[in-house]
Image (cartoon, rainbow, N blue to C red):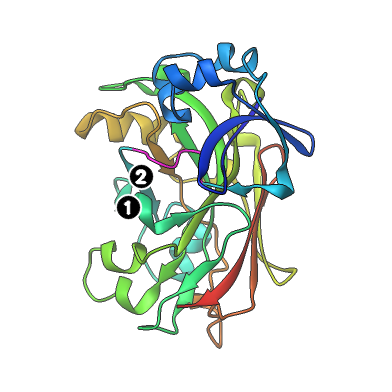
Amino acid sequence: MRLASFQTGNHRSYGVVDGTMLREADKAFRVRYPDLRAAITAGKLDELAASTSGATHAIDGVRLLPPIPNPDKVLCVGVNYRPHIEEMGRKVPDYPVVFVRFPGSQTGHGQELIRPALSEQFDYEGELAFVIGKRARHVTKADALNYVAGYCCFMDGSVRDWQNHTPQFTAGKNFATSGSMGPWLVTSDEIPDPSVLTLTTRLNGEIMQEGRVSDLVFDIPRLIEYCTSFAELLPGDVIATGTPGGVGAARTPPRWLKAGDQVEVDIPGVGLLANPVADE
């Protein structure tokens, strides 16, 4: 099942993607569960599939939002593919390198990524992200995938000079609408083994990154085990797993994003997340 959050005019809602159409959750269901995060928290995704008697919209006729527009946490993992570790001149970490993105730094499929006026070093990072499906604390690797609601594509837009101001990544990862998530959430029953997935990032149609999720230094079960050791993860929380090699900062000359560019993160079986780039 593919689940999407969207907006038409001032109306925000969610529903089930069916081909090129989006079947909106009916009004009674949305009164009880006003957004997708609430439906996940209540464990009602099966009911959602049977409660889509609301309006039907063409996907290209609505504004797609991040699948979870209001997560409690967005955790990102840096330097988690060996080729990216090597190109950035780093050592393989002993523990996952976890940093935080604010929900407001994300936009949805088809929406503009904004290159901030303060920097020309705006870089792309295509990633696989997953969404937590139930409260999770001290979860073991063996049980970890049972806590995943689903998967989506993620573009961790990075303002490199600001990222490198200090050893902490926060400043360079949180400019408003510098990243994206979507186009929808694919429920975990459709992807029982995420390690078989592949990822490609394209810039204006040119392949810039290619990776296999099986090449993660810290795989998804390990990330869940680690993150639930220091925090309680809540339904709707997002974890982005890291980016393969090929980022713009590591190229000669560097390949920075500029207005008019189009970035695509393509994960077969999950979706294709596409965003144009505009200047602030």
Judge from the rendering whether residue 10 lies leftward or rightward of residue 42; answer left or right. Answer: right
Residue 142 visible: no
What percent of the width, then of the height, locates residue 82? Answer: 49, 56
Check contact, mark 1 vs mark 2: CB within 8 A: yes
The alpha-carbon separation of the residues under discs 1 and 2 comes to 7 Å
Q: Specify few, some or many for label 2: CA neighbours under 10 Å numbering under 14, 14-19, or 20 or more.
A: some
Query: Closest to the observer: 165 or 93?
Result: 165
Q: Specify few, some or many for label 1: CA neighbours under 10 Å numbering under 14, 14-19, or 20 or more.
A: some
Could you tell me which quadrant the C terminus lies in?
Answer: bottom left
Could you tell me which quadrant the N terminus lies in?
Answer: top right
Looking at the rendered structure, the kind of residue marked 2 is Val
Furthest residue to the front? Answer: 10
Determine the main secondary structure of the stretch shown in magenta.
loop
What percent of the width, then of the height, locates residue 19? Answer: 79, 34
Residue 208 visible: yes
Query: Closest to the observer: 82 or 203?
Result: 203
Magenta segment, which residues? 66-71
What percent of the width, then of the height, locates residue 197? Answer: 65, 39
Judge from the rendering whether residue 175 lies leftward or rightward of residue 246; answer left or right. Answer: left
Q: Provide the secondary structure element on which disc 2 rests.
A: strand
Furthest residue to the right? Answer: 19
Q: Provide the secondary structure element on which disc 1 rests.
A: loop
Q: Which dot marks residue 102?
A: 1
Q: Name the residue located 46 percent from the left edge and 18 percent from the top edge.
A: 146
Residue bearing mark 2 = 74
Query: Closest to the observer: 24 or 127?
Result: 24
Placement of 159 over or under 128, stated as above or below: below
Q: Name the residue located 63 percent from the left edge and 57 percent from the top edge.
A: 110
Q: Quadrant of residue 90?
A: bottom left
Placement of 135 over or under 93, stated as above or below: above
Looking at the rendered structure, the kind of residue marked 1 is Phe
Judge from the rendering whether residue 220 lies leftward or rightward of residue 255; answer left or right. Answer: left
